[in-house]
Amino acid sequence: MPVNEQLTSRNSFAMRVQKKIILSPPRMLCGIPLSDGTGEGRIWHAHCGITKRVRRTHTIPENLVISEVGKMRHAIQLVSLVLENSILQVTERLGVSYAGMFVVLREMLHDPSLMEELIVKIESQHLEAGTAIAKTFGSFRKRLSNLPDQYLKERANDLLELQGSLLDALASSNALAAAAKPNWSDKIKTVNTVAVVETLTPRLVLDLKKSQVSGIVCENAGPASHAAILCRALGIPAVEGIKNIIDELPRDRFAMIDGTTGCIGISDQRKDLLPLFRNRSNPGISNEHTIDLSKITLMANLNFARNAITALAAGAQGIGLYRTEFEFMVANRLLTEQEQFVRYRNVVTAMMGLPVTIRLIDIAADKSPEFFNSFGNNSDPSCCGALFLLSRPELFKTQTRAIARAAAFGPVRVLYPMVADAEQFLCLKKAFCDAAASKALPALLHGAMIEQPSAVSDARRILESADFACLGTNDLTKHLLHVDRDTAIAHGAEIVGSSKLWDAMGQVASVALTLDKELTVCGEMASDVHLLTRFTELGIKIFSMDIRTIRHLRKRAADPVSKDLELSAA
């Protein structure tokens, strides 16, 4: 065959192959929403330093033990410097509360028991530093993963991040030191990029924010993980739960993600995905557009007093759940009555006459900071919520007096956590009123968190005694179905749609309707916009949710086609 004909034949074949690739059908994947918003761009595989290492056990001779301990200590110092830099960055951008997650990592890194175990493995077993780190962190992660408490389980991922950072520090000290101030400009050539990563960590979220990626898809994170919280705070759309993610999302293809629904579209060309996203639907789940916001009340969850203005600006019709324990935990000490009063008063005045529901300290004895244990010495792990408060009367009285003083500035409702039955609710209410007797006590409303099966069974008597009640969906799901919050979200209809769970919530809702008592839905399910219609069918019309979700719903109500226009814009 002549050369010209050969070239023509090859070019024709190449064009056919290229055409075949371009015309390959787009795909839709369904993941777990982590952070709302939409993003699009070419897929880029990010790496966070947590590589899947298959490490063999390496030993060292006796005369190198001291040197190996020195290497290990040097690696810890380097990682500590990186964490300090992260704390400064996050504090400057988001405030002290979000920097707290990096403070937790720093404290874990310098935990005496961890350091002791590392040194023992090197000195007694003659293990090289990398092997000692891998074995020690692996052992700690296994212990945490086997615990029933979800908060402690999530710390296992933190240990994984620390392990990867330490091993990288050992491998290349200079590389890790440079990572404290990474320059992603040479790694990501355009901001129109969707980052794909196996394990998402807080540090990686910060780095990806600097690179201005339009969204993140990961295999492992958890909706309540530090990385997910940071994504939501920074406004980065994110989805998790995609298995074999590197194969499922090959680099350089085009992706669109919806962090609200968990939908991920993949194609070779952007235009092929637009029809899929316009027409996407999830059968069996109510669409958020069917909700008439004029018929429901959207209240905000609040962790810190300084965010009250943000809640009001987002369109919140009050504070449905002010989790006061977070104020203590960020301060890392017990707050005085005056300090608490100032915070509560600021929230009440910021809401300008809208109701503020202040939940008393809700924390379990087995996971409380040491300063909470200075009042009383009950270390029973089952002593949580209401029992925790009753076991520490001085702590209870101090908070009571602060709330009573703040109530003079606007409508305040007191919420008692983890109430077991009507007797316990009345006991808490009496203790509150007795402690506040010396104050000019205004007409406070008293409510109960119904989040235990025993409280569901005793819902009628509780609501006969209470002014209002809140359904704590996180703990109710955990206790009724014996699963944690992340598992419930991950399994979608299987758990969140459980008839046992909905029957229990329906039972409480029915009692509230009969007695004409206000019932609010709190917890993760209240922020799931796809479940709002189902709750309204039970007669529930008040929801306490994340501020970002309120903003999202208000925006959609004001301009229902705005999101579609974003996706279809040229």
Image (cartoon, grey):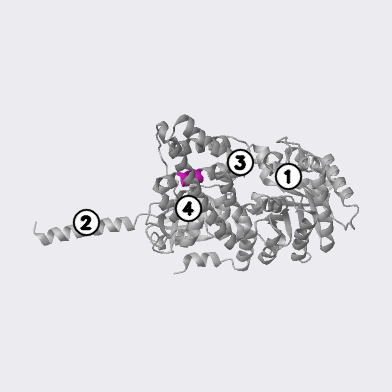
Residue at mark 2 to residue at mark 4: CA–CA distance: 35 Å
Q: Quadrant of the C terminus?
A: bottom left
The residue tagged with tag 4: helix, strand or loop? strand
Q: Which residue is mark 2?
A: 13
- At 66% from the left and 42% from the top, the residue drawn is 477
Residue 423: x and y, percent?
84, 40
Report crowding for label 2: few under 14, some 14 to 19, many 20 or more residues within 10 A (C-alpha).
Answer: few
Residue at mark 2 to residue at mark 1: CA–CA distance: 73 Å
The residue tagged with tag 2: helix, strand or loop? helix
Q: Which residue is mark 4?
A: 217
Q: Nearer the viewer, mark 2 or mark 1?
A: 1
Residue at mark 4 to residue at mark 1: CA–CA distance: 38 Å
Q: Which residue is mark 1?
A: 372
Residue at mark 3 to residue at mark 2: CA–CA distance: 57 Å
- Which residue is outermost to the top? 125
First of labels 1, 3 by sequence position: 3
